[in-house]
Image: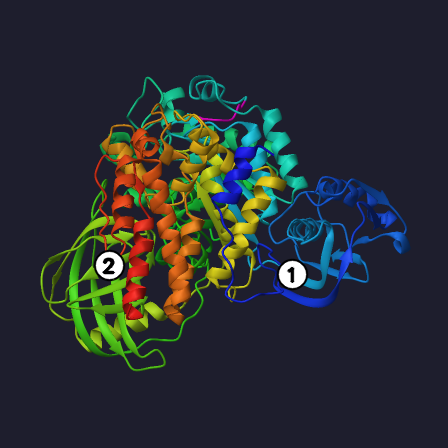
Amino acid sequence: MNKFIYLIGIIMLIVVLPRTASAQPALMPKPAKVIMLTGKTQLNAELGVHISKQHQALLTPLVLNSTFAQQFTKLDWRDVKNAQLQISISQRASALPYLGMDESYKIVIADNSIKLSSRNQYGILRGLASLSQLMFSAEKPRELTNLVITDAPTYPWRGLLFDSVRHFLPIEDVKRTLRGLASAKFNVFHWHLTDDQGWRIALNSYPKLHQQASDGLYYSQAQIKDVVAYAAMLGIRVVPEFDVPGHASSIVMAYPELGSGTTLTELERRWGVFKPLLDPSNPKVYKFVDEIVAELAGLFPDPYLHIGGDEIDDTDWQANSKIQAFMREQKLADSHALHAYFNQRVAKILAKYNKKMIGWDEVLHPSLPKNTLVQSWRGHHSLAAITQAGYDGLLSSGFYIDQPQWSSYHYRNHPQQPVKPRVTANAVIGHVDFTLTRLKGSAVTGDITVFESDDDHAGIHAIVNIVGKGAFITDNVTKTADNYQLLIDTWLGPTQLTFNLSNTASISAYVGNTPYAFTSHGADKVSLIQLNQQLIHEQQRVKSGNVLGGEATIWAELITTDNLDSRIWPRLYAIGERFWSPASVIDERDMYNRLDVMNRYAIEKIGLQHQQQFIQRLKQLPISSKDDLDALVTFSQLIEPAHYYTLHHLAFLRDEYHQLAPLDKLVDVLPVESLTLKQFDYAVDDYQQSCDDQQLLLLHSKLLKWQQLLEREQPLFLAVQQWQASYSAILLALKQHDKLTKQHLVKNNNGTIPQVIASINRLKKARLGCGQ
């Protein structure tokens, strides 16, 4: 392995030690049930494998292609008595993975052998993935602890949306991502292939799409078929997305006769929502959809096809007299009804080719065919509306990994939120209206009511109403001096709001690690009756549809082949666990401990490139030695990219929010989360519980080592212009670690957050709590 990759693996991502020693294996996703047995099983380097003759042709390729098999010098096929690995299934399932396939499996490691059994070949794939992880984390080569694993997924739909449009991503990136998905037990690859900025698939029916609207960067039909077959071998379905009627600039540029008014002479290079839409009144549009779907059906065998359907700017529809006349003729009251009419027509076309429709939130309408699967990017309030209307749903809000976010935030985001005890208010403490100002787009506005509860969860609570995003109830509310502070998980990220109930105040809120301008002002209290009516309404769970699971999304505005992995991994293992493991698996510290193991496993066994991509960017700096690289790696442990869409918004303010802007900054490939600081923060938590002087000494020793490095290597760090501001702020905070330091986000900076300052503040508060 490249020595620099090994270096960052050792230095950058230190194991987060668990609070107590655990015999449980470091598996991710965590299995539904693990029983630890006594003793060990030592596997031979040349492993004997038994598969019944009936299933040898089916299962042998799956075993040979597995990461598990790669950890042996040779596999020998033997009779059951002489085989250390015995694999069995009850029946053969369809050759192509499908929704609802049985992926359960059982592993028994005992008596110096392994028995892997399942209902079908897809369970075997998931079991082999677990065995490979067990092999990797074994204390001695090929020596496994005896145990029994009984496992099955919580949700049948566990996907990743992969955007190959905004920036084209080669087939090798696609296949590497698929291998990573299989290692995390995902089973859907949602391939976003068309959008405003390009058309990425060669079709015979409308060749100008890829000839004129792709910059020559598209996938051939042979490549598409190869990817579908490759994914199937990994137990992964490939679901294409063909975006209509919006996000259609590339279609309108190639075939302007299909559009509603706005015409284009060149590809759209900017990011955002644009005017070109297909014309729902034009019969040629439905012929176009029919012929496109016919070709896609021949390339993608999965019964689902995603039609997008999101972010409709209806300006052209409103201005087009022909479309307005069509709406009057069809008795369509508004653009939403016109959009629903279009979706109905498209659904019938899909049905003609035995395809079921998937669309984003905006397709939801009373006239929508009931077998439509609706995917929520807007949030849990939207997902609730989807299921209450009787539709099956998928959740993507909270899993947008093109945004830097902590893994713990994604981990708390259940597709179906666990039912919590009902909260009833017995006294209203106060009420404020608030405004959170973003760097781009409209402000986030709403109101907060703080109240007391005397039920099973007595104490201070708050309900936060955010315009357009629903309500959030939390008991994570504290009072400090004259202010209240609360923390809620929103579509923005973990959102911390600090406010005064009586005075107008301007205080920075935090979205994850990033401060945002925030103002609040006192308002008239709501009545206790009104408050409890809202609490009852928000806590009711009435639905007739199901939540099938969720999908993480890797939108590619700020993604290229050079930083793709750095934004996906290792976070996706945490999301994979949320989709697979029982909802009762919620220990974040244990998750981080296992995530560190998976991070190294992903690099060393799966071949994922997230650390390599960061090292390659560091090596482009004017460094002269390995010691310089070591120092930069250590410094990178103290910083993080700004959370939410801050990097996107800063790029917009620099006029670099477009397809041609270079993504050559350090922050573009900086690891999303510092696991080193996560370890430090957990150590601070331990100290806060014990107030042990020796623990405090070790924490201060760590701060001193960081300070000494920054002082010793000052010329090196100051030469890295993109990190200068963070360097100065961190060095000052380390020198004054007994003082609380406020973080500031400066407009037009490089989006780097000196996150260690928050860790220093955390230690200072713990010391105060311990009286030190």
User: What amino acid is found at the position of numbered circle 1 in the picture?
Assistant: Asp
Mark 2 is surrounded, within 10 Å at the Cα level, by few (under 14), some (14 to 19) or many (20 or more) other residues, namely many
Left or right: 378 as drawn, with respect to 432 = right
User: What amino acid is found at the position of numbered circle 2 in the picture?
Assistant: Leu
Q: Secondary structure at mark 1?
A: strand
- Seen in the picture, residue 461 relative to 722 is either above or below; the reply is below
Q: Quadrant of the N terminus?
A: top right
Dot label at residue 497: 2
Residue 431 x %, y % = 16, 67
Q: Earlier in the sequence, mark 2 or mark 1?
A: 1
Near-viewer residue (299 or 176) = 176
What separation in Å lies between label 2 and label 1 (alpha carbons)? 40 Å
| Disc 1 target residue | 151
Dot label at residue 682: none
Near-viewer residue (498 or 15) = 15
The answer to whether residue 202 is magenta is yes
The answer to whether residue 367 is magenta is no
Q: Is residue 636 among the parts visible in the rendering?
A: yes
Q: Quadrant of the C terminus?
A: bottom left
Left or right: 476 as drawn, with respect to 239 = left
Left or right: 697 as drawn, with respect to 561 = left
- Seen in the picture, residue 131 relative to 34 is either above or below; the reply is above
Quadrant hosting residue 761: bottom left
Q: Secondary structure at mark 2?
A: strand
Mark 1 is surrounded, within 10 Å at the Cα level, by few (under 14), some (14 to 19) or many (20 or more) other residues, namely many
Give, as a single range, the part of the protein colored magenta.
Answer: 199-203
Residue 702 x %, y % = 39, 52
**At x 64% / y 52%, what residue is drawn?**
137
Left or right: 569 as drawn, with respect to 32 = left
